[in-house]
Image (cartoon, helix red, strand yellow):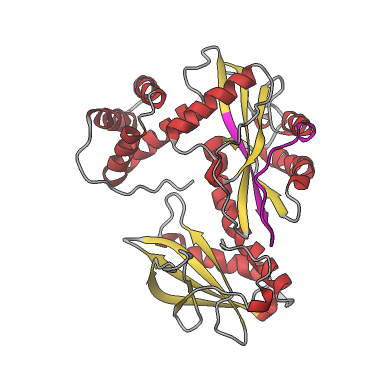
Amino acid sequence: MKRTRLKRRGGLGRVAEQLAWLASSVAESGSRVEDRYWEMKLGGVLDQHLATNDEEALNAALDHLYSTEARAYDELADSIESRAECAAGAFPEHDVVLIAAPILAWSRYRIPAAVVPPAVLANLRVHLRAHVLAQGARLAVADFLFSPDQLPQGYCATAEFSKVLGAAAMGDHDLRIDTTGMPETTHFLSDTRYLLAAVAVPRGSALFHWQEEGGSRDSAREQWRRQGGACLAPLLPGCAVELVLPESYFAASRAADKDSRPYSVRASVAYLGTALETPAANLRAVIASFWDRELEEYRIGFTTHDSDQVLHGVVWPLLGAEDEEADGSSQIEAVLRESGINDVLHLEHHFPLEYCDDCGAPMYPSPEGELIHAEMPEEHMEQMPRHLH
């Protein structure tokens, strides 16, 4: 999840000012002992306002620090995320953490967001315990594959969900999700689904397998992709899937955001090759940077060699601290060439963030340096996603 803030008008309220001061104090601390003092103070205030659903004060403090004190902003963002995903204060004798297991998927058809059957849930518990979690950890898994729009919205909602799922983890049983009123899922060519769970251990004990002697993230990732992928694939029929290592909620979400960028490029090349019945070597990719007040994203327009019509497009957003110095266009080109596209055109012009007035879809760069609505030929439009990542 990209930590991007847009500055809001008006002065800081009392609560936001207190949060900003405490975060600045953590950032300026000169010792671990002082760190613990300020972190305890900050954590107590955060727990209070997460519990009272004071999302506005949290965001106001973050907005203020984002434009004034980068280190304090990072400290406050880390503290808010930690308190929200750890159900802080709800389970005094245990460490309880909300975890996410993201699944990258692409398909010419609709990517499901669906209930996980009990038998599949039982198998997923087995593989999470065997390959991801520390020995003896209690576990609760939510019985639904969430789309991004269906995840808890905001820090306060995340904190509340962490407590509910954490309580189930304390009882070592799974959680049934009431899907009544859940938002509809937008139809994308490539998208992410999230399996959410909570893990509970005695305070100070290891949570994950890689915290134990002989464990490693790489081994956990490999085993989870193999074993967990075999369980999850039947829930996503007609989809190509790739699993991201399950971790604490916000860390896993950021990893999914990062991994989804090259995944969506590879998915688009594979899709175009299938839909147009042409090898990747017959495609051309046009890369351009898109700016608001600063560089926000790159967009890639795909054409064939014999046409300037943009058939498909992909957005590559900047994440975290990335800016124009990160050379995202070179990263994109590397993924394109690995996918089999040899004709890659970089446009030097800085484009504004333009979208279609009718449908809201992003406009993509053409080889002629124009912004064009991506459209497949009519004969290839059957069962096409309405929106393209």
The residue drawn where x is 39% and y is 28% is 53
Toward the top, the furthest residue is: 93
61 lies left or right of 284: left
- Indicate left or right for 118 with 290 as reference: right
Going by the image, does 210 lie left or right of 257? right
Residue lying farthest front? Answer: 180
Q: Residue 143 placed where, x, y %?
A: 68, 33
Residue 193 visible to the viewer = yes
Please identify the residue farthest to the left as the structure is shown: 11
Depth check, front residue: 340 or 10: 10
Please tell me whether residue 187 is drawn above or below residue 299 in the rendered image: above
Residue at 58%, 36% in the rendered image: 180
Q: Which span is picked out in magenta?
A: 98-120
Of 206 and 51, the residue lying toward us: 51
Residue 154 figure quarter = top left
Residue shown at 65% from the left, 72% from the top: 381
Residue 83, above or below 170: below
Q: Any magenta on residue 106? A: yes
| Residue 69 seen | no
Q: In the rendered image of this protein, does residue 13 appear above or below residue 171? A: below
123 drawn magenta: no
